[in-house]
Amino acid sequence: MEGGTLLVRLNRYLSMCGVASRRKADQLILEGRVKVNGLVVKGLGWRIDPQRDIVEVDGKEVKPPKYRYIVLYKPCCYLTALGKVKDGKRTLEELIRDIPERVYPAGRLDYNAEGLLLLTNDGELANRVMHPRFKLPKTYLVWVQSRVSKETLEEMKRGARLEDGFARPDSVRLIRHEADKSLLEVVFHEGRKHIVKRFMAHFGHKVLKLKRTAIGPVRLGNLKPGHWRELTPSELKALRKALRLEDGKPA
Ligand code: URA
């Protein structure tokens, strides 16, 4: 094995390729239906180099799907949905036309909210981004109506009982006041519907503008509305770490 080469157990590789569960893959191996580089493999502990080895099942080569991880700046007034315009409302479809893989949004933003959406065809990673168990913080910049007082800010930090349960932000801070409105940065690690709007409404502050600026270690940065970019390898590594997906384990 050369430095840096990551060997993967054959049954795990077959499940990554969507051929079968690991247990069923073991069965396929024992039945002599799996070849590596042209030779039938019957040992269950066999490891392969996915970059170099050619794996066949029943004489057909199998390959893992190409995963894409996209950072999209959803502009205001787009539905977090794919497919054609719905009820006259535009969808993400027109923004990601140039991506051939079928990527899906991992989480959502309201029609009138904007900012960072992660899109991927890696189902396990997407589930973890959305699941509160993994406590991935989502950061929002929020303009709210009227001036948020120091007292209210302290109350916000303690959380609020909403109609579907208690909600407490990981953090909330006032950035500035401007005329009759305030700009806050709030971080939640859960994705209940309209969580930021309902939380602010609880304190009597209507949300005027909502922008998601970060999901875990991934930041929107200076991406322009309607534009997308690929996650960088270091962002993907940090995101997988935050989601407790070790490198080399199936995502
Ligand atoms: N909270 C909201 O209220 N809306 C969003 O789009 C995201 C979080």
Image (tube, grey):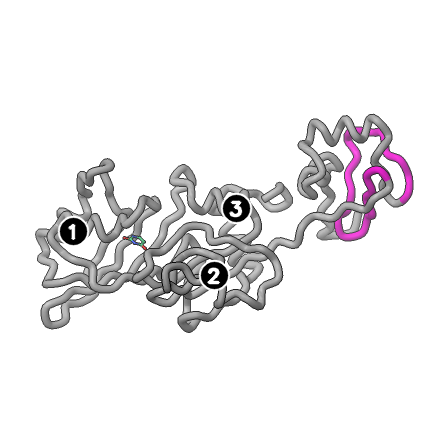
Magenta-highlighted residues: 38-58
Give the amino acid at mark 3. Answer: Leu
Q: Which disc is residue 201 wearing? A: 1
The location of residue 241, given as percent across then percent down, is: 51, 47
Q: Is residue 47 magenta?
A: yes
Quadrant where the image shows the C terminus:
top right
* Label 1, residues with CA under 10 Å away: few <14, some 14-19, many ≥20: some
Give the amino acid at mark 1. Answer: Ala
Q: Decide if residue 13 is on the left or right side of residue 141.
A: right
Q: Decide if residue 162 is on the left or right side of residue 27.
A: left
* Label 2, residues with CA under 10 Å away: few <14, some 14-19, many ≥20: few
Q: Is residue 181 magenta?
A: no
Q: Residue at x 60, y 46 (%)?
A: 247
Q: Residue at x 55, y 66 (%)?
A: 97
The dominant secondary structure in magenta is loop
Query: Mark 2, mark 1: which one is toward the viewer?
Result: 2
The location of residue 64, given as percent across then percent down, is: 70, 48
Q: Tag 2, which secondary structure? A: loop
Q: CA distance from mark 2 to mark 1?
A: 32 Å
Which residue bears the numbered disc 3?
A: 125
Vertical side of 228 occupied by 80: above or below: above
Give the amino acid at mark 2. Answer: Lys
Q: Tag 1, which secondary structure? A: helix
Q: Residue at x 68, y 31 (%)?
A: 22
Query: Mark 2, mark 3: which one is toward the viewer?
Result: 2
The location of residue 110, given as percent across then percent down, is: 33, 56
Q: Decide if residue 93 is on the left or right side of residue 47.
A: left
Nearer-N-terminus badge (1/3): 3
Vertical side of 87 occupied by 193: above or below: above
Q: Nearer the viewer, residue 215 or 103?
A: 103
